[in-house]
Image (tube, grey):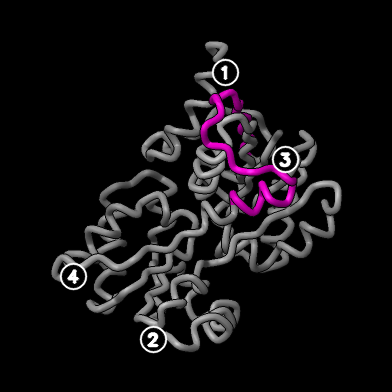
Amino acid sequence: MKIALMDSGIGLLAAAAATRRLRPDADLLLSSDPDGMPWGPRTPADLTERARGVARAAAALRPDALIVACNTASVHSLETLRADLEPDIPVIGTVPAIKPAAAAGGRVAIWATPATTGSPYQRGLIREFAAGAAVTEVPCPGLADAVEHGDEEAVVRAVAAAAALTPSDVTDVVLGCTHYELVEEPIRAAIAERAGGAQPVYHGSAEAVAVQALRRIGVAPAPELPATGTLTVLLSGRPSALPAAALGYAEGRLVAQLAHDAAVGR
């Protein structure tokens, strides 16, 4: 069983680690686009062409499913990718977890990139799934780039700026960019400081998309299985190792363990 994940950069690590935890026997294929990132500022048509190239590189290695582990690419490119690859390869998109965050009807903050914040797409999700909740859209300029480059000081600055825009009585926080799930702990600390120690519930998408990918190929989660899966990395179509910045995050180190285990024959 081989699960492919694609993104412009290392934001795919959260979903890759979730897949690894749910199915330690799954082979993971990570396909990203360092030559073309960031995708956010690109036009939808340009972004879609970059995404198609990354998806095709992954598809050439015949995965059983492909996770589009990028909110922006899911918004603009998901239907095109499905038209290209399905039904041979199921394609699973990533949607911000607004629905579960708003289920209790509390005060919800949606942390997202500036391009996504206030967009018709996000506003549509809010209307559909969060009509009974008080919602604050929080733009996070620079945060995804800081995460991508492993710049801890820039992460702290970007998180602090976004936390200052987050209501102190927030009950639920949506991490609306896959990169943000890699720095959930600094986000938790900044919001707790603003809220006097109170901690809201955090909602990411990584585990949900991993579960959906397994469901689409008819496989149940089995975290108790031996860790026999392997790791393949494509950077703009080129076979490579994980980027160095990936190893700065727990999710990256967990995924990297696949390559180590394969090398020693475990």
Q: Disc 4, disc 1: CB below 8 Å?
A: no
Disc 1 residue type?
Ala
* Real-space CA distance between mark 2 and mark 3, rounded to the nearest whole angstrom: 40 Å
Q: Quadrant of residue 203?
A: bottom left
Front residue of 30/132: it is: 132
What's the CA distance linking mark 4 and mark 3? 42 Å
Position of residue 163 measured from the top left corner of the image (x, y, whole percent): 27, 69
- Mark 4 or mark 1, earlier in chain: 4
Residue name at image x 73 percent, y 51 percent: 216
- For marks 4 and 1, give the CA distance: 44 Å
Few, some or many residues within 10 Å of mark 2 (<14, 14–19, 20+): some
Query: Three-letter amino acid code at disc 3?
Result: Ala
Q: Mark 2 — residue?
A: 134
Q: Which residue is mark 3?
A: 58
Q: Which residue is mark 4?
A: 194
Front-most of residues 180 and 17: 17
In the image, residue 155 lies at what x, y percent?
A: 31, 54
For the residues carrying marks 4 and 2, which lies nearer the camera in this image?
2
Tag 1 residue: 262
Q: Are marks 1 and 3 in contact (CB under 8 Å)?
A: no
Residue 151 location (% of width, % of height): 33, 46
Mark pair 1, 3: CA separation: 20 Å
Element on which disc 1 rests: helix
